[in-house]
Image (spheres, rainbow, N blue to C red):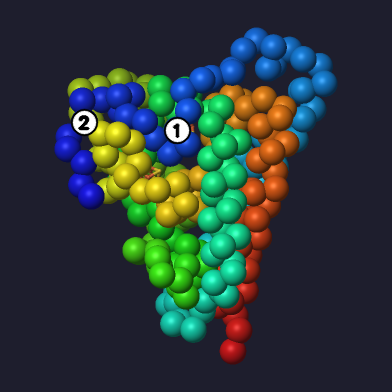
């Protein structure tokens, strides 16, 4: 669904948004027992996870074979993980609503990972493109955003949004969104989570991480 032209990026609700309360308080940073946990979460799910996904994507075959697919039970695990993450990341709602940047990139978020996990189901992924994990694209994108912020370019231009973004936020049900949309954290969104949210997010994130590995393995089978 093609959204109408938005007035501003901040006016949209985006990927992790369903709830409205934000518990990003000074206490989140100051509690001594929370700091090591927070650092672990950042290293694990902001730093390492993203490097791992790029590495897995790099090992993908150029052409995806039709037989590369996981058992439908894998998609059940994915759907459950998406719904669990919806609850645990609700705490990120305010920061993502204020930012909205994730949904304002004209790049396909459905990747061959989504295609393989959902291939044998009633709701296959509608597309699959690895561009979002491409290092040249990431470098180019980071430089372009850096310049725009540094020189305050295109201040009145609305960036092209994801095709699924509507004026009410993402038009896809949570469980039908690309895996990257529900499992990706920037430092800012990760810092919005309290200890309970970080703990609760670990298990569904591990499921989604594991599905990425299983999807890649399925491309190597004869
Ligand atoms: S599918 Fe598009 S609109 Fe939906 S959460 Fe992902 S990036 Fe945002
Ligand atoms: S995850 Fe980070 S970059 Fe993406 S919308 Fe939320 S705050 Fe912005």
Residue 196 x, y percent position in the rendering? 71, 30
Query: Left or right: where does residue 86 sit relative to residue 36?
Result: left
**Residue at 68% over, 34% down:** 198
Q: Residue furthest top?
A: 26
Residue 26 position in % (x across, y down): 65, 10
SS assignment at label 2: loop
Q: Quadrant of ligand 1?
A: top left
**Disc 1 CB within 8 Å of nearest ligand 1 atom:** no
Quadrant of residue 195 in the image?
Answer: top right
Furthest-right residue in view? 33
Residue 136 in sight: no
Q: Is residue 160 above or below residue 107?
A: above
Tell me if mark 1 has few (under 14), some (14-19) or many (20+) residues whose alpha carbon lies within 10 angstroms of its own: some
Of the numbered discs 2 and 1, the one sitting upstream in the chain is 2
Q: Name the residue beneath numbered marker 1.
A: 18
Q: Which of these two is toward me, 76 or 192?
A: 76
How busy is the neighbourhood of tag 2: few (under 14 within 10 Å), some, or many (20 plus)? some
Q: Residue at x 47, y 67 (%)?
A: 118
Query: Mark 2: is the Cβ under 8 angstroms from ligand 1?
Result: no
Residue at numbered disc 2: 6
How far from the left and from the top, in percent, is residue 86? 53, 40
Quick check: 197 left or right of 104? right
On the question of residue 199 being in view, the answer is: yes
The quadrant of the picture occupied by the C terminus is: bottom right
Query: Could you tell me which secondary element the residue under label 1 belongs to?
Result: loop
The tag on residue 103 is none
Q: Is residue 192 left or right of residue 146?
A: right
């Amino acid at each position: 669904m093609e959204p109408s032209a938005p007035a501003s990026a901040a006016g949209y609700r985006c990927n992790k948004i369903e709830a409205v309360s934000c518990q990003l308080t000074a206490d989140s940073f100051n509690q001594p027992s929370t700091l090591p946990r927070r650092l672990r979460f950042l290293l694990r799910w902001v730093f390492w996870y993203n490097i791992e996904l790029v590495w897995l994507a790099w090992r993908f075959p150029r052409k995806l074979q039709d037989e590369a697919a996981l058992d439908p039970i894998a998609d059940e695990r994915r759907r459950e993980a998406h719904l669990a993450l919806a609850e645990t990341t609700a705490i990120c709602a305010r920061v993502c609503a204020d930012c909205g940047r994730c949904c304002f990139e004209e790049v396909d978020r459905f990747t061959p990972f989504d295609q393989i996990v959902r291939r044998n189901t009633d709701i296959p992924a509608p597309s699959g493109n690895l561009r979002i994990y491409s290092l040249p694209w990431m470098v180019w994108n980071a430089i372009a955003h850096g310049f725009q912020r540094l020189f305050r370019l295109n201040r009145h231009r609305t960036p092209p949004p994801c095709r699924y973004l509507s004026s009410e936020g993402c038009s896809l049900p949570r469980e039908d969104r690309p895996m990257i949309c529900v499992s990706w954290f920037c430092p800012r969104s990760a810092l919005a989570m309290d200890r309970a949210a970080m703990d609760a997010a670990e298990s569904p994130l591990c499921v989604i991480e594991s599905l990425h590995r299983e999807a890649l393995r399925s491309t190597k089978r004869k």
